[in-house]
Image (tube, rainbow, N blue to C red):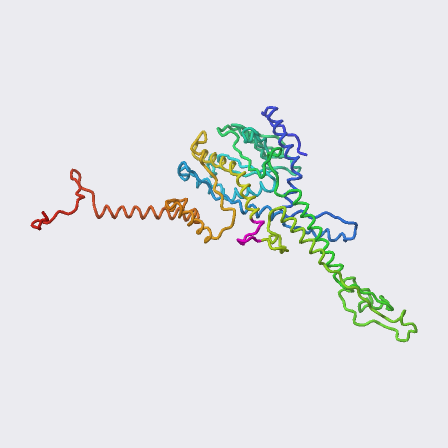
Amino acid sequence: MTSTVRLPRVDSDTNALINGLLGELDKRRPRNYLRACYYDGRRAVRRFGSGMIPPEYFKLGLVLGWSAKAVDILARRCNLDGYTWTGGDLDSLGYQEVMDENFFGAESSSAVISSLINGPAFLINTTGAEGTDEPESLIHVADAMNATGELNGRTRRLNNLLSVLKRDQERNPLDLVLYLDGETLVASRDRANRRWSVDWSEHPWGVPAEAMIYKPRTGRPFGSSRISRVVMSLQDRALRTMIRMEGHADLFSYPELWMLGADPREVLVDDDGNPLPAWQAMMGRIKGIPDDDQATDERLSRADVKQFQQSSPTPHTELFQQCANDFAGETDLPVSALGVQAKTNTTTADGSDNAEKQLVAEAEGATDDWSPALRRCMARALAIKNDLDEIPAELASLATKWRPHAYLSRSAAADAGTKQLSVVPWLAETEVGLELLGLSDQQIKRAMAEKRRKGSLSLTDRLTQNPPAAEGQQQDTSAPQQAAGAPSNS
């Protein structure tokens, strides 16, 4: 439990708000940490059963990466490709600089993954520190493990946001930032004297943070995790099956033998007469057994070896495949993505997978939920970049541009674009038309630049062939006059 924070020169309401948000972080931390463990592959199954499985198998630390697959495969279909602005030229506002200086392509992917793991992720706008080499406009990403706030249900914006930057070994905060409407509080605690230093700053940006939320719904404004309780339960079930398979491989895959009429102290020993370890006895091959051919009762004293057939691992593998099928159905993943071959044909007439279509629909819904936060964050970043006091109204047409959620080959994309351009031919001369043909942003920019360059060269050629008339003279654009003395038609 985090200790109570008392910041100097801060009113009681603000201190109460900080402690309330810290308490919310502590409350949510166990589940958030558990989901992070599933994603990072640090979740080993607990001991189960009635003691039939030796305890050594629970020390193997067997894990599965299915939960990470559920997050990563969806995240890879939700790639932010940039922004578009119908109201003007984004590069004139320093858009490309903001993208490059903040590595925002990678930062947005980080926010997507954090949102899928925990439900919300937070985008925070700040200004670079004066006198340093920091960019003028900064965008940070905070996950639900270290940041939380109050979401206003009427404005759909954050009333505040608390971000804990550093903690000590007892998980008490050392550095934290509280974002309020028009104000930002930065607090740091000295490790030696345990005293807090506080710095206030004002800005015109309201609460400079946005919440990217996966699957928001009424009653759960901060959404849900992709790693749901069902997903965790199915992964645990598959892990238990793996442990049973490990035990089966060691204990039940060797043929069981028993001997009649032979002394184990003479047969199952090494050259020095010491008893063989169990694994050597099972792995070894019995070449000969001492026998008493003078025995009168062969049923009791003559050596004889019998064998039980080894147990098949098929029931375990079939159960593991069923776990994979259940997990794939819950997360809309192809079964083959989990390393298991599908038992039935899951492809449609066009060659696609049924699960892939559902995954594309899930990706479209997720990006629709994330787009408003990403738009507002970039609009605020551009306003900070241009040292404005408010976000220009013209930036209301700023829109996110996502990479296609379905995987299309270049030929398929070009074919679909050609059919659309045949209906509206004039689109072929625009950037939108080139985008429909499947060209990348860099290719589109190069193509348009080449077109403008050729257009300027053709204009130069026309002016060279027909130079403008001198000042005070009228340029003769009529046809050449008939030569003197030439016959006339009249």
Residue displayed at 40% across by 38% down: 89
Q: Position of residue 434 (x, y in %)?
A: 41, 47
Q: Position of residue 294 (x, y in %)?
A: 90, 75
Front residue of 352 and 447 = 352
Magenta residue span: 347-356
Main secondary structure of the magenta stretch: loop
| Residue 365 falls in image quadrant | top right
Front residue of 315 and 488 = 488
Q: Position of residue 429 (x, y in %)?
A: 37, 46
Left or right, residue 97 beside residue 256: left
Front residue of 198 and 305 = 305
Front residue of 487 and 334 = 487
Q: Position of residue 314 (x, y in %)?
A: 71, 58
| Residue 164 falls in image quadrant | top right
Query: Would you say residue 477 sits in the magenta stretch?
Result: no
Query: Would you say residue 349 sits in the magenta stretch?
Result: yes
Q: Residue furthest front?
A: 490
Rendered position, 16 above or below 298: above
Rendered position, 435 above or below 276: above
Left or right, residue 151 beside residue 384: right
Q: Residue furthest right?
A: 296
Rendered position, 336 above or below 160: below
